[in-house]
Image (spheres, rainbow, N blue to C red):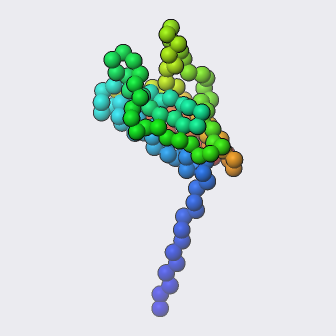
Amino acid sequence: TSLVVLTMPERPSPELAAAQRFANSLRLAQDRAILTGRPVGLQLGEGDYHFEDWQSSRWQDVSGTYEALPERTRLELLDGAPERDEEDTVWPVLVFDPTGVVSEASFRLRGRQEYVEIRVASSGEVALETR
Protein backbone atom coordinates (compact mmCIF):
# COMPACT_ATOMS: atom_id res chain seq x y z
CA THR A 1 0.00 0.00 0.00
CA SER A 2 1.07 3.52 -0.77
CA LEU A 3 0.09 6.83 0.65
CA VAL A 4 0.42 10.04 -1.33
CA VAL A 5 0.16 13.32 0.51
CA LEU A 6 -0.35 16.46 -1.51
CA THR A 7 0.46 19.77 0.07
CA MET A 8 -0.37 23.16 -1.31
CA PRO A 9 2.14 25.94 -0.93
CA GLU A 10 1.13 28.72 1.39
CA ARG A 11 -0.60 31.54 -0.45
CA PRO A 12 1.40 34.78 -0.26
CA SER A 13 -0.13 37.85 1.35
CA PRO A 14 -1.49 40.52 -1.03
CA GLU A 15 1.54 42.66 -0.19
CA LEU A 16 4.05 39.91 -0.93
CA ALA A 17 2.26 38.97 -4.17
CA ALA A 18 2.32 42.64 -5.29
CA ALA A 19 6.02 42.92 -4.35
CA GLN A 20 6.80 39.79 -6.37
CA ARG A 21 4.99 41.25 -9.40
CA PHE A 22 6.91 44.51 -8.94
CA ALA A 23 10.24 42.63 -8.75
CA ASN A 24 9.39 40.71 -11.94
CA SER A 25 8.46 43.97 -13.68
CA LEU A 26 11.84 45.44 -12.70
CA ARG A 27 13.64 42.42 -14.17
CA LEU A 28 11.64 42.76 -17.40
CA ALA A 29 12.46 46.49 -17.58
CA GLN A 30 16.17 45.69 -17.34
CA ASP A 31 15.82 43.13 -20.13
CA ARG A 32 13.89 45.66 -22.22
CA ALA A 33 16.65 48.27 -21.83
CA ILE A 34 19.31 45.76 -22.90
CA LEU A 35 17.31 44.39 -25.85
CA THR A 36 16.17 47.76 -27.23
CA GLY A 37 19.41 49.62 -26.56
CA ARG A 38 17.42 52.44 -24.86
CA PRO A 39 17.18 53.46 -21.21
CA VAL A 40 13.98 52.36 -19.46
CA GLY A 41 12.65 54.31 -16.47
CA LEU A 42 10.27 53.49 -13.64
CA GLN A 43 7.58 55.99 -12.62
CA LEU A 44 5.56 55.63 -9.42
CA GLY A 45 1.95 56.81 -9.24
CA GLU A 46 -0.46 57.06 -6.32
CA GLY A 47 -1.81 53.54 -6.74
CA ASP A 48 0.28 52.20 -9.60
CA TYR A 49 3.61 52.18 -11.38
CA HIS A 50 4.65 52.08 -15.01
CA PHE A 51 7.70 52.18 -17.27
CA GLU A 52 8.91 54.68 -19.83
CA ASP A 53 11.43 54.51 -22.69
CA TRP A 54 13.90 57.30 -23.49
CA GLN A 55 13.12 58.17 -27.12
CA SER A 56 13.52 61.34 -29.15
CA SER A 57 15.16 63.15 -26.21
CA ARG A 58 12.25 62.57 -23.81
CA TRP A 59 10.59 59.92 -21.65
CA GLN A 60 7.63 58.18 -23.31
CA ASP A 61 5.19 55.75 -21.73
CA VAL A 62 5.62 52.10 -22.64
CA SER A 63 2.14 50.84 -23.43
CA GLY A 64 0.91 47.90 -21.38
CA THR A 65 3.24 48.52 -18.43
CA TYR A 66 0.80 50.17 -16.01
CA GLU A 67 0.41 47.94 -12.97
CA ALA A 68 -2.21 48.80 -10.36
CA LEU A 69 -1.39 48.05 -6.74
CA PRO A 70 -3.86 46.25 -4.48
CA GLU A 71 -6.34 48.50 -2.68
CA ARG A 72 -4.84 50.32 0.33
CA THR A 73 -1.31 49.43 -0.74
CA ARG A 74 1.40 52.02 -1.21
CA LEU A 75 4.73 51.73 -3.03
CA GLU A 76 7.35 54.28 -2.06
CA LEU A 77 10.95 55.03 -2.90
CA LEU A 78 13.09 54.97 0.25
CA ASP A 79 16.17 56.65 -1.21
CA GLY A 80 14.87 60.14 -1.97
CA ALA A 81 12.57 61.93 -4.36
CA PRO A 82 12.41 61.93 -8.16
CA GLU A 83 14.48 64.59 -9.89
CA ARG A 84 12.98 67.35 -12.04
CA ASP A 85 14.64 69.12 -14.95
CA GLU A 86 14.42 72.78 -16.02
CA GLU A 87 11.07 72.15 -17.70
CA ASP A 88 9.71 70.59 -14.48
CA THR A 89 9.62 67.15 -16.07
CA VAL A 90 9.60 64.41 -13.44
CA TRP A 91 12.42 61.97 -14.17
CA PRO A 92 11.90 58.28 -13.44
CA VAL A 93 12.74 57.16 -9.92
CA LEU A 94 14.87 54.37 -11.36
CA VAL A 95 16.58 54.13 -14.76
CA PHE A 96 17.83 50.92 -16.38
CA ASP A 97 20.78 51.56 -18.69
CA PRO A 98 21.09 49.58 -21.96
CA THR A 99 24.33 48.10 -20.57
CA GLY A 100 22.31 46.42 -17.81
CA VAL A 101 23.49 48.78 -15.05
CA VAL A 102 20.95 50.46 -12.77
CA SER A 103 21.28 52.85 -9.84
CA GLU A 104 20.85 51.08 -6.53
CA ALA A 105 17.47 51.77 -4.98
CA SER A 106 15.19 50.64 -2.15
CA PHE A 107 11.41 50.62 -2.14
CA ARG A 108 8.79 49.80 0.45
CA LEU A 109 5.45 48.27 -0.45
CA ARG A 110 3.16 48.83 2.50
CA GLY A 111 -0.30 47.32 2.91
CA ARG A 112 -2.79 46.39 5.59
CA GLN A 113 -1.10 43.20 6.79
CA GLU A 114 2.62 43.81 6.39
CA TYR A 115 5.23 45.60 4.37
CA VAL A 116 7.86 44.35 1.98
CA GLU A 117 11.16 46.04 1.24
CA ILE A 118 12.46 45.68 -2.30
CA ARG A 119 16.13 46.36 -2.96
CA VAL A 120 17.63 46.79 -6.42
CA ALA A 121 21.41 46.28 -6.77
CA SER A 122 23.47 48.06 -9.45
CA SER A 123 23.63 44.72 -11.31
CA GLY A 124 19.82 44.74 -11.52
CA GLU A 125 19.42 41.94 -8.98
CA VAL A 126 16.19 42.38 -6.99
CA ALA A 127 15.79 41.17 -3.40
CA LEU A 128 12.62 41.10 -1.29
CA GLU A 129 12.41 41.22 2.49
CA THR A 130 9.09 40.82 4.32
CA ARG A 131 8.64 42.69 7.58
Among all residues in the image, which is located at the extreme bottom? 1
Identify the residue at the far top of this view.
86
User: Going by the image, does 123 lie left or right of 56?
Assistant: right
Left or right, 106 with reference to 52: right
Quadrant in which the C terminus appears: top right
Residue at position x 49%, y 40% in the image:
67
Counting from the top left corner in percent of width and height, residue 125 is at: 46, 37
Q: Nearer the viewer, residue 24 or 54?
A: 54
Left or right, 108 with respect to 59, comes to right
| Up-down relation of residue 97 to residue 85 (above or below) | below
Residue extending furthest left?
36
x, y percent for residue 102: 45, 27
- Numbered circles on residues, count: 0
Residue 62 visible in the snapshot: yes
Expressed as whole percent of the image width and height from the top left, the position of residue 57 reads 36, 15
Corner quadrant of residue 29: top left
Quadrant for residue 36, please give it: top left
Tell me which residue sits at (33%, 25%) in the image. Answer: 38
Q: Residue at x 55, y 50 (%)?
A: 17
The answer to whether residue 123 shows anywhere in this view is no
Residue nearer the viewer, 18 or 59: 59
Q: Tell me if residue 43 comes above or below residue 88 in the rendering.
A: below
Residue at the image position 54 percent from the left and 31 percent from the top: 44
Residue 103: % across, % down: 48, 25
